[in-house]
Image (spheres, coloured by chain):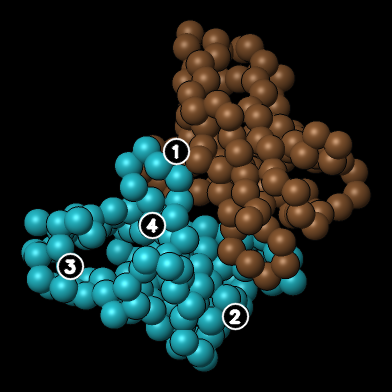
Chain colours: A cyan, B brown
Amino acid sequence: GAVVSQHPSRVICKSGTSVKIECRSLDFQATTMFWYRQFPKKSLMLMATSNEGSKATYEQGVEKDKFLINHASLTLSTLTVTSAHPEDSSFYICSANGGLEETQYFGPGTRLLVL
Amino acid sequence: AQSVTQPDIHITVSEGASLELRCNYSYGATPYLFWYVQSPGQGLQLLLKYFSGDTLVQGIKGFEAEFKRSQSSFNLRKPSVHWSDAAEYFCARISGNTPLVFGKGTRLSVIA
């Protein structure tokens, strides 16, 4: 199947700093990518839909100025957690639609810990 | 709103026993249905998917799932569970170019 990568896989940062997470589709082009957040022992929560060349669409309750999304190319979307706080600590997962199919392929996730 | 329900939060199965994980979806246009598996601390891996056609779909790792429109179900099955199957399993649906809607997941424990 299609491969989606995320970098970094794990990051620890100080409160108040910003963290950028990259999501790449390695062997296909993705006009749409999705960013999810997963709390411990919980299901995934959709944060936003990232569209190449346009502004991301955020889900209700997700602060767009807090979670900046940039989808500059057909293979790369980035999520920047600005002025991170301990409550932002979570597992962040991206996904991308694989080609003509509706199948979403997921990245391996990024574990963020804010101290 | 479209939804996916996984009634079982946690299931424990003996190694070698059969497994069935339940998934129900809410009414709507014929959905695309998926099962994903997530090992602890890992991302999600696609097990199988149903778009149309044969209602019994085969996936990786010996899993299969059956789409039953009359019951709005897409249950995941495996005839003989291995200890390495212990993980969290998510059922999900999509309609059109929309994000996946996930069930809350079912945690599978495998005992000797």
- Residue at (46%, 81%) from the top-left corner? A56
Image quarter in which the N terminus of chain B is found? bottom right
Which amino acid does the dot numbered 4 rest on? Arg
Residue that label 2 marks: A31
Measured in 3D between alpha carbons, the distance from the residue under mark 4 to the one under mark 2, in whole angstroms, is 20 Å
Which amino acid does the dot numbered 2 rest on? Thr
Q: Chain of mark 1?
A: B
Which amino acid does the dot numbered 3 rest on? Ala
Q: Chain of mark 3?
A: A
Residue B85 visible in the current orientation: no
Residue that label 1 marks: B39
Comparing marks 3 and 1, which lies closer to the viewer?
3
Compared across the picture, whether A97 is left or right of B49 comes to: left
Cβ atoms at labels 4 and 2 below 8 Å apart = no
Residue occupying the far bottom of the picture: A53
**1 and 2 marks on the same chain:** no
Please tell me which of labels 4 and 2 falls first in the chain. 2
Measured in 3D between alpha carbons, the distance from the residue under mark 2 to the one under mark 3, in whole angstroms, is 28 Å
Please tell me which of labels 4 and 3 falls first in the chain. 4
Compared across the picture, whether A102 is left or right of A114 comes to: right
Question: How many residues crowd mark 1 within 10 Å: few (<14), some (14–19), many (20+)?
Answer: some
- Residue at (67%, 58%) from the top-left corner? B94
- Residue at (59%, 58%) from the top-left corner? B100
Residue that label 3 marks: A84
